[in-house]
Amino acid sequence: MITKQFTINNKIFIVAITEQIIEYINSLKSLYNVSYEDTESFDQTSSEISNIVKNISEMITPIPADNDLDGLIQELITSVDAKTAELNELQTEYNKTKTKRKRTKKQKK
């Protein structure tokens, strides 16, 4: 778990980036894509987006006002995306190292 501090509208907010927050952010991104691609489902996706944003806002200290939420959600999406990219890069490097070790052991035999 990582704790992040964001300054939005000259106010400081603190968020623990937990698995739950990451799931919420990934769900939001999916719902945003659905609402752009399928305008007929906008009412349903809009309601789901609202619920997720409400859940996220309750996990932020202090609880943000409505006019702070858009900026906070954007910052959270950016942070989660950056952390996901970092973890993917580490996994790729680990896999490369693991593969090299296997090749080296096979060559020694």
Image (cartoon, rainbow, N blue to C red):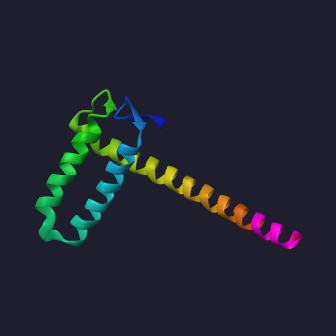
Please report the residue visible at 35 percent of the width from the left and 55 percent of the height from the top.
26
Residue 64 falls left or right of residue 83: left
Q: Is residue 93 above or below residue 9?
A: below
Viewed as shown, does residue 92 lie left or right of 55? Answer: right
Furthest toward the top, the residue is: 62
Which residue is located at x 32 percent, y 58 percent? 29
Q: Is residue 68 visible in this depiction of the protein?
A: no
Asked where in the image residue 17 lies, by quadrant, the reply is: top left
Residue extending farthest right: 108
Q: Residue 65 in the image: state x and y as whole percent.
A: 23, 33
**Image position of 40 with respect to 3: above or below:** below
Range of magenta residues: 101-108
In magenta stretch: residue 80: no
Q: Residue at x 41, y 35 (%)?
A: 16
Tell me what residue is drawn at x 33 percent, y 46 percent.
73
Looking at the picture, tell me which residue is in the foreground, 67 or 53. Answer: 53
Q: Is residue 59 above or below residue 88?
A: above
